[in-house]
Image (spheres, coloured by chain):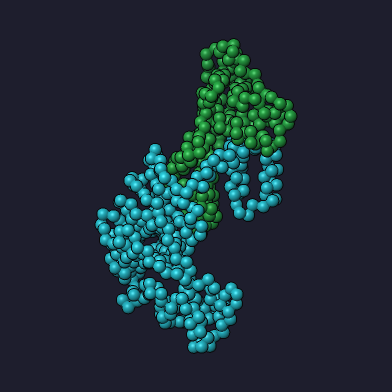
Chain colours: A cyan, B green
């Protein structure tokens, strides 16, 4: 006896699809046709729709003033959405929060827009510098300090407190520290951790593959999917890894494509390398991240490349 | 599969078996839908309780409930909105259980007559839950808290923060298929919870199960 179960699954599909932004008139017509097939279809769809509308009232909530404590899970995981209008601010919890947590303050959102760089002081004395196009969320409780890095790059100068671990969540990755200076950067599914001082522990997603790795000063860890690459930065390059904190980009034997990608993190109008053979061209030097014009001028004047600025891009060709 | 036998009912109680229908014109879908939401769906937990008490196999409850809803809609569509939605719903439910048991050819019709009959409540003694807005929110939140963490997260990002499946997949580091599946589990459980059910995750969405039927054990 599964007739209604199957109908319910279909009805649920419709309900999910209908919420899609690309739901069109012909989809609506198809749904109506399906509903018209039987009252069983109607009963299932109307029931789900009604129940879901009721559940969705939570979405209109500004804040949970009185978190219910009747269930074992005491996450403070709801957050005002209205304030977080920008996509940049949307955060992913990693669902790794222990259930024994006594209390959660509402997480706070911070962001740096494209081209911006800012320092966020935390209540425990930790300083977080966030780079261009970065969104983080911070929650500090009595027993734990947590930051979620959703996009971009951040440098942490963590106040020492061995009783309260400081945890950075990056997608499925976590970086746990007690007191140190390090940066975390997220590029799509790639996560790079670079340590300036102290030691941090980098944990994979716990689903096979990468386990925990501890890296110290001058070392880095690059994680993609479930594999992690550990390495050391040469002595004279360690500071280079953090030059963004001064608004500078430093390149040494980088390719033009890499340099362009890096600049493009700071600007809405991207540099596009039109000629393919230029992409591998070696570039070195120190540039102001904000000053893409100076860099482009250098390409034109020193390397004799053609620069063509359009509405949407700065095109470089030879 | 036997209905559980109930004590003999008084004559007055038996009178409730008749169906109360008023009006007579055909209802359009819009009215039917709003009536269904307003009058019938709030009774869901009562209905499920009734079915559970009067039907041996709890595996069948969801199917029976939807059968009843289907019949309720067809009846109201044809005959107009019943004056007493409650009495109507439970009469349909009872008749359906009788028909199902008859088809199962297991019990005699005499035994079925003793099936629990819906007892009308005195005015103002409504047994179902009516939430004031604040309670509803708390209720909704309790439903969300029951969900497993990953599922809850997907619901939050997709439905509360309005992200696309793709964006959610990127943030959580899983495939969009996983996101969609989790979303459906979570929505179904949450809807169930909002309508007074246990709000548990049921993982067999969309799969053809092998639940037992009136073929009996």
Residue occupying the point 56% across, 13% down: B9
Location of residue B52 in the rendering, given as x and y in whole percent from the top left corner: 52, 26
From the viewer's perspective, tell me whether residue B116 is left or right of residue B146.
right
| Residue A281 visible at all | no
From the viewer's perspective, tell me whether residue B29 is left or right of residue B195.
right
Q: Is residue B103 above or below residue A42?
A: above
Q: Nearer the viewer, residue B210 or B70?
A: B70
Residue occupying the point 30% across, 51% down: A143
Location of residue B145 in the rendering, given as x and y in whole percent from the top left corner: 44, 42
Q: Is residue A17 above or below residue B62?
A: below
Q: Nearer the viewer, residue A13 or A223?
A: A13
* Image quarter in which the C terminus of chain A is found: bottom right
Q: Quadrant of residue A121?
A: bottom left
Residue occupying the point 49% across, 76% down: A260
Residue occupying the point 58% across, 47% down: A16
Location of residue A275 in the rendering, given as x and y in whole percent from the top left corner: 57, 80
Q: Is residue A131 above or below residue B23?
A: below
């Amino acid at each position: 006896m599964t007739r209604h179960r199957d109908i319910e699954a279909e009805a649920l599909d419709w309900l999910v699809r209908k919420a899609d932004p690309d739901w069109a008139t012909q989809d609506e017509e198809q749904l109506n046709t399906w509903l018209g097939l039987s009252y069983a279809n109607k009963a299932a769809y109307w029931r789900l729709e009604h129940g879901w509308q009721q559940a969705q009232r939570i979405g209109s909530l500004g804040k949970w003033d009185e978190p219910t404590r009747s269930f074992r899970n005491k996450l403070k995981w709801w957050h005002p959405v209205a304030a977080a209008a920008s996509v940049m601010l949307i955060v992913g919890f990693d669902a790794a929060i222990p259930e024994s947590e006594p209390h959660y303050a509402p997480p706070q959102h911070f962001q740096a827009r494209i081209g911006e760089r800012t320092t966020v002081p935390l209540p425990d004395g930790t300083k977080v510098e966030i780079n261009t196009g970065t969104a983080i969320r911070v929650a500090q409780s009595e027993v734990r300090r947590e930051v979620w890095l959703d996009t971009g790059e951040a440098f942490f100068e963590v106040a020492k407190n061995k009783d309260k671990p400081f945890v950075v969540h990056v997608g499925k990755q976590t970086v746990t520290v007690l007191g140190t200076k390090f940066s975390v950067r997220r590029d799509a599914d790639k996560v790079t951790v670079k340590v300036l001082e102290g030691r941090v522990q980098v944990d994979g997603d716990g689903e096979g593959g990468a386990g925990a790795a501890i890296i110290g000063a001058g070392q880095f860890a690059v994680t993609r999917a479930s594999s992690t690459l550990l390495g050391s930065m040469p002595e004279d390059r360690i500071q280079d890894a953090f030059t963004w904190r001064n608004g500078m980009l430093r390149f040494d034997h980088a390719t033009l494509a890499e340099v362009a990608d890096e600049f493009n993190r700071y600007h809405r109008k991207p540099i596009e390398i039109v000629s393919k053979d230029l992409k591998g061209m070696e570039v070195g030097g120190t540039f102001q991240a904000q000053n893409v014009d100076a860099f482009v001028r250098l390409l034109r004047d020193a390397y004799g490349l053609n620069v063509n600025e359009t509405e949407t891009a700065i095109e470089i060709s030879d | 599969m036997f209905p559980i036998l109930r004590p003999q009912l008084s004559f007055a109680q038996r009178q409730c078996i008749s169906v109360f229908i008023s009006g007579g014109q055909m209802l359009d879908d819009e009215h039917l839908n709003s009536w269904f939401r307003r009058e019938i769906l709030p009774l869901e937990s009562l209905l499920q309780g009734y079915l559970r008490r009067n039907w041996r196999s709890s595996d069948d409850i969801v199917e029976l409930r939807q059968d009843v809803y289907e019949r309720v809609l067809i009846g109201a569509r044809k005959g107009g909105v019943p004056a007493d939605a409650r009495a109507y719903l439970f009469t349909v439910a009872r008749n359906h259980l009788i028909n199902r048991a008859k088809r199962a050819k297991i019990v005699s019709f005499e035994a079925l007559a003793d099936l629990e009959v819906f007892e009308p409540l005195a005015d103002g003694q409504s047994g179902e839950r009516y939430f004031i807005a604040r309670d509803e929110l708390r209720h909704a939140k309790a439903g969300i808290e029951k969900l497993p963490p990953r599922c809850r997260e997907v619901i939050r990002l997709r439905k509360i923060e309005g992200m696309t499946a793709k964006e959610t997949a990127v943030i959580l580091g899983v495939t969009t298929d996983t996101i969609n599946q989790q979303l459906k589990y979570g929505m179904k459980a949450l809807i169930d919870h909002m309508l007074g059910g246990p709000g548990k995750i049921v993982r067999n969405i969309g799969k053809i199960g092998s639940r037992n039927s009136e073929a009996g054990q």
